């Protein structure tokens, strides 16, 4: 069914506040989730609310976190999230990173001890909306079979990037797997099959059944494997946090904080080139990519993130598609209906 952005935001915020977090934090989390749904990234939108609500209600998300921000150098800092909502810590730390880059040209901010923070495109677009380049990486549950391996070690470990053009930003947000785990969750919610290139079953064989998935596979084989290693080092090892297979499971114990890490990098173009020309050239790149001769079977070459931008604009007019079951949950008085607690990382 179709729901307006405003109504969806309010429904999500109400549910999260009812679960136990402050109205201010519930609004921020809802902003990030609606951002994802509006872009058509439903794997990181309202489908996550029930899980978040259960974790909040059971204490695994700190309802009153004592956030701290410590500069460790002119261009570096650590933001401690005190196991509060990851979306809130990631947003506030990006605000600080932008200020630092405005003053000193570049900022690298590590975020320690947070929960799941949702779609990274939200945070890098904070930077590009301020005229900066934004990069963000974060670690996640070990649920990816490393290249040449038969059991999970790394997470989907996403990477996001955004740069400002004259009127639009160019943004991409990708998992280092062929597909994000949230996409499997989305397929489950719709009782839909998945392509056999996304994941493997318990025997390591490709599967089209989203409920049979026990491991995802890296994008481009060893290349994706290398990228997920890089992300894990930058957002785990570098910050003195659990890494690799030691990263906490999203579902193992919803009464405990997850201790996750994330890293923001913000670059101020004015310290490297004429910022006006920089934005003009970003726009030129976007236009020239659209003008590239399309290959057979394609109508047009799109720049990275263009589909999501188009869907976001359409959602302002037509509303956002939400699965009926999820909408029914959001309008209910239930905090959660099915428990994710103490499930495997591949809980349904």
Image (cartoon, helix red, strand yellow):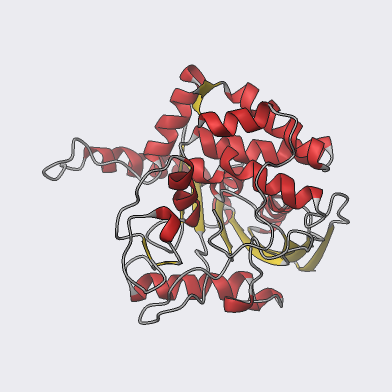
Horizontal arrangement in the rendering, residue 341 relative to residue 206 (left or right): right
Note whether 123 is above or below 219 in the view shown: above
Q: Nearer the viewer, residue 103 or 179?
A: 179
Residue 33: quarter of image = top right
Horizontal arrangement in the rendering, residue 272 relative to residue 126 (left or right): left
User: How far across and down, in percent of the image, does residue 327 sit?
Assistant: 59, 29
Horizontal arrangement in the rendering, residue 231 relative to residue 235 (left or right): left
Q: Is residue 273 visible?
A: no
User: How far across and down, in percent of the image, does residue 217 sit?
Assistant: 39, 67
Horizontal arrangement in the rendering, residue 125 relative to residue 94 (left or right): left
User: How far across and down, in percent of the image, does residue 181 sit?
Assistant: 48, 56
The residue depicted at 73 percent of the width and 35 percent of the height is 334
Residue 78: quarter of image = bottom right
- Which residue lies most toward the front here? 338
User: How far across and down, in percent of the image, does residue 298 sit?
Assistant: 18, 40
The residue depicted at 31 percent of the width and 37 percent of the height is 287
The residue depicted at 56 percent of the width and 72 percent of the height is 232
The residue depicted at 49 percent of the width and 42 percent of the height is 189
């Amino acid at each position: 069914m179709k729901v307006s952005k405003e109504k969806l935001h309010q429904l999500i915020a109400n549910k999260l506040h009812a679960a136990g977090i402050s109205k201010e934090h519930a609004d921020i989390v809802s902003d990030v989730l609606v951002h994802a749904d509006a872009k058509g990234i439903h794997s990181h939108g309202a489908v996550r609310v029930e899980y978040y609500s259960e974790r909040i209600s059971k204490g695994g998300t700190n309802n009153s976190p004592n956030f701290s921000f410590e500069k460790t150098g002119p261009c570096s800092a650590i933001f401690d999230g005190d196991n509060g909502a990851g979306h809130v810590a990631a947003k506030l730390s990006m605000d600080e990173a932008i200020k630092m880059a405005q003053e000193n040209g570049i900022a690298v901010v590590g975020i320690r001890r947070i929960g799941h923070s949702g779609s990274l495109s939200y945070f890098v677009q904070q930077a590009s909306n301020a005229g900066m380049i934004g990069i963000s990486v974060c670690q996640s549950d070990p649920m990816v079979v490393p290249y040449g391996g038969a059991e999970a070690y790394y997470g989907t470990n996403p990477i996001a990037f955004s740069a400002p053009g004259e009127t639009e930003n160019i943004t991409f947000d990708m998992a280092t797997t062929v597909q994000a785990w949230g996409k499997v969750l989305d397929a489950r919610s719709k009782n839909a099959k998945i392509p056999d290139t996304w994941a493997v079953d318990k025997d390591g064989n490709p599967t089209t059944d989203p409920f049979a998935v026990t491991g995802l596979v890296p994008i481009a084989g060893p290349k994706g494997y290398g990228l997920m290693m890089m992300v894990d080092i930058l957002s785990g090892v570098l910050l003195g946090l659990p890494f690799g297979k030691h990263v906490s499971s999203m579902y193992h114990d919803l009464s405990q904080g997850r201790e996750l890490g994330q890293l923001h990098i913000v670059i101020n173009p004015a310290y490297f080139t004429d910022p006006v020309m920089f934005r003009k050239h970003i726009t030129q790149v976007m236009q020239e990519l659209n003008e590239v001769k399309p290959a057979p079977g394609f109508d047009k070459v799109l720049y990275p993130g263009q589909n999501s931008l188009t869907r976001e604009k359409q959602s302002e007019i037509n509303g956002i598609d939400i699965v009926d079951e999820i909408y029914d949950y959001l309008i209910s008085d239930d905090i959660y209906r099915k428990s994710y607690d103490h499930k495997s990382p591949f809980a349904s």
